[in-house]
Amino acid sequence: MGEHITCQEVVELVTEYLDRALPSDEATLFEQHINFCDGCIVYVEQMRSTVAAVGHVREEDVPPEAKERLMAAFREWRRT
Amino acid sequence: MIAYKFLRADGSSVFTGFGWPLPAGGPGAWVEAPADPCRSGIHACRVADLPYWAGRALYEIELDGELVEQPTKLIGTRGRLVRRIASWDEQRDAYTRMCADRAHELVAAAPPELSHWDAVVEPSIVEGPALLGFVAARIAEEIAASPAAYHAERERQAAWLAERLGLPA
Amino acid sequence: MAHPRLETPPAADEAELLARLRDGDERAFEALVDRHYNTMLAVARGYVKSRAVAEEVVQEAWVGVLKGLDRFEGRSSLRTWIIRIVANIAQTRGAREARSVPLSSLAPEGDEAAVDPDRFRGRDDAFPGHWQQYPSDWEALPEQALLGRETLALVIEVVAGLPAAQQQVITLRDISGFTAEEVCAALGISGGNQRVLLHRARSRVRSALEEHLDG
């Protein structure tokens, strides 16, 4: 990995970094880089915002027919 | 052990946003870090590490408990901020300027194929000391085609800081 | 810039729901269905051709859950176990549909750059690999820009359009809050695989958001 990493490398490492899965020395280089690179700080923040936006997806209600079939299956199972 | 730590202007950690108890008429409260020093822990700098982590506000930090030494940082399990190093606030711009001047100097003495490396220097000033420190060290490395030159430039930067900030060298 | 804790651990009531379920409590079953149905559907969609087939698979999976309740030992979280069941059934079904290899078990294909390489300085430039121009700061936008209806609709659309395996992983991780370990256990993929898929999925969503927000 060397003494420093580039922005191009940072954007490929960001997922690992946010998962705290980067090996220690890579994490150090990552942090040293974002410490001086305004562009990459913004990018990491964009990625955090992206994850937050995805997290806001509210799942639809279970379709009523599907739910009915499932409850019927449950009652059938419970009977036996 | 006494070490150093850069924080944001509001006293929060640069990478985690953790709000450090700041010194006020005496050291700040002790902070305990989670048990795994390599994954988490309190990060701090020896004097030699300062250029790699240049930030907004500089503090002296007392580390206690388990200590892990890594190439460019210390990791502790217990620490408290002792005092703000006000001289950093005064010297920050001068340090940035010093790194910029070094970058120009290095490029000027380098083969002409590298002259285009000079163009980023002045526009980078507004982004501050961390970037300029990197720019100068990176240029040094490019000219020498050697990672050792990158670290040597960092050592120069650390020596400058030690002297100007009155830190043990 | 705190590390967001976006994983939501398996709900504390899993043990209670399981006990009630084993007791034949219909409301416990309904609660679990409400909680996991969509995730199961998303996972099934990763293996089979149509939504209709995926729905059938999910039905089958719930029956499998009920029939397997006695066997569940609690070594994984309940939700991991449920997803594993639907994944297995969907994989089998997908194989029968003549998709010869379950999608998620393939190593992520080829290379997929998170950001267009043109956005970075080239090899002959000074500071190769660094941004030519910084990406824009979304913090400066009003909160609604990122969390408003239009953006949400875009996110849903992009996620729905992802390659199947990427969609599965980002759904499990970032919509349903599963941990990385749970996803690996549920889908039978390695940690490395999981992370590459998540990385690519998130990068595509970010890219789409950037296009939308930068106008």
Image (cartoon, rainbow, N blue to C red):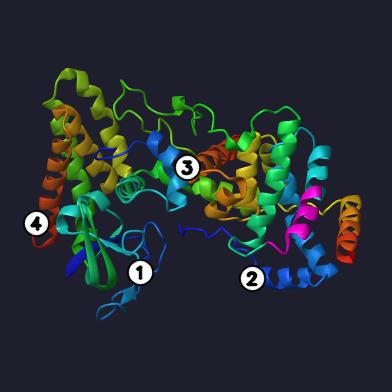
Amino acid type of the residue tagged 4 in the rendering = Glu
Query: In the visual, does C9 lie left or right of A23?
Result: right
Chain at tag 1:
B
Residue bearing mark 2: C12
Q: Secondary structure at mark 1?
A: loop
Residue that badge 1 annotates:
B35
Q: Which residue is mark 3?
A: C192
Is residue C69 magenta-colored?
yes
Type of the residue with mark 3: Gly
Label 2 to label 4: alpha-carbon separation: 56 Å
Region rendered in magenta? C60-71
Q: Is residue C67 left or right of residue A10?
A: right
Q: Which mark is residue B117?
A: none
The residue closer to the viewer here, B122 or C72, is: C72
Is residue A57 placed above or below C125 in the rendered structure? below
- Which tag is nearer the camera, tag 4 or tag 1? 1
State the SS at label 4. Answer: helix
**Circle 4 sits on which residue?**
B163
Q: Nearer the viewer, residue C118 or C71?
A: C71
